[in-house]
Image (cartoon, grey):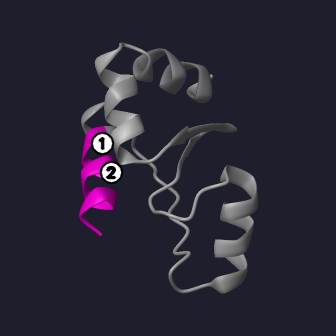
Amino acid sequence: CPFCIRAKRLLEQRGVARIDEIRVDLDPVQREQMMRATGRRTVPQIFIGETHVGGCDDLIALDQRGGLAPLLQAAAA
């Protein structure tokens, strides 16, 4: 999906070397788990560590507010 690609590109630009993708479009059980965990049906749903960031637009907004770098640093520690 274009939003998934955009989110992955932003994370890679911010130095994320490993992105674990869960293809909920191929696995109904994983989709149900995602929906229970996030309350959302759309993809991507992005987690950094245990923190649910939201979707692609949420990730971009977080980055623009300066909140993405500290979250990535905390997750890497």
Question: On the picture, is 25 further left or further right than 7?
Answer: right
For label 1, the crowd category at 10 Å Cα-Cα, with few meaning under 14, some 14 to 19 and many 20 or more, is: few
Q: Please report the bounds of the magenta region as a residue range.
A: 1-10
Question: On the picture, is 16 further left or further right than 51?
Answer: left
Instruction: Determine which residue is flagged by label 2.
Output: 8
Give how far across and how far down residue 18 sits, in percent: 45, 49
8 versus 27 height, above or below: above
User: Number of labelled discs?
Assistant: 2
Query: Which circle marks residue 75 in the picture?
Result: none
Residue 5 occupies quadrant: bottom left
Quarter of the picture holding the C terminus: top right
For label 2, the crowd category at 10 Å Cα-Cα, with few meaning under 14, some 14 to 19 and many 20 or more, is: some
13 versus 30 height, above or below: above
* Residue found at x 56% / y 65%: 41
Query: What predominant SS class does the magenta segment belong to?
Result: helix
Secondary element at tag 1: helix
Query: Which circle marks residue 12 in the picture?
Result: 1
Circles 1, 2 touching at the beta carbon (< 8 Å): yes
18 versus 69 height, above or below: below
* Residue found at x 34% / y 24%: 63
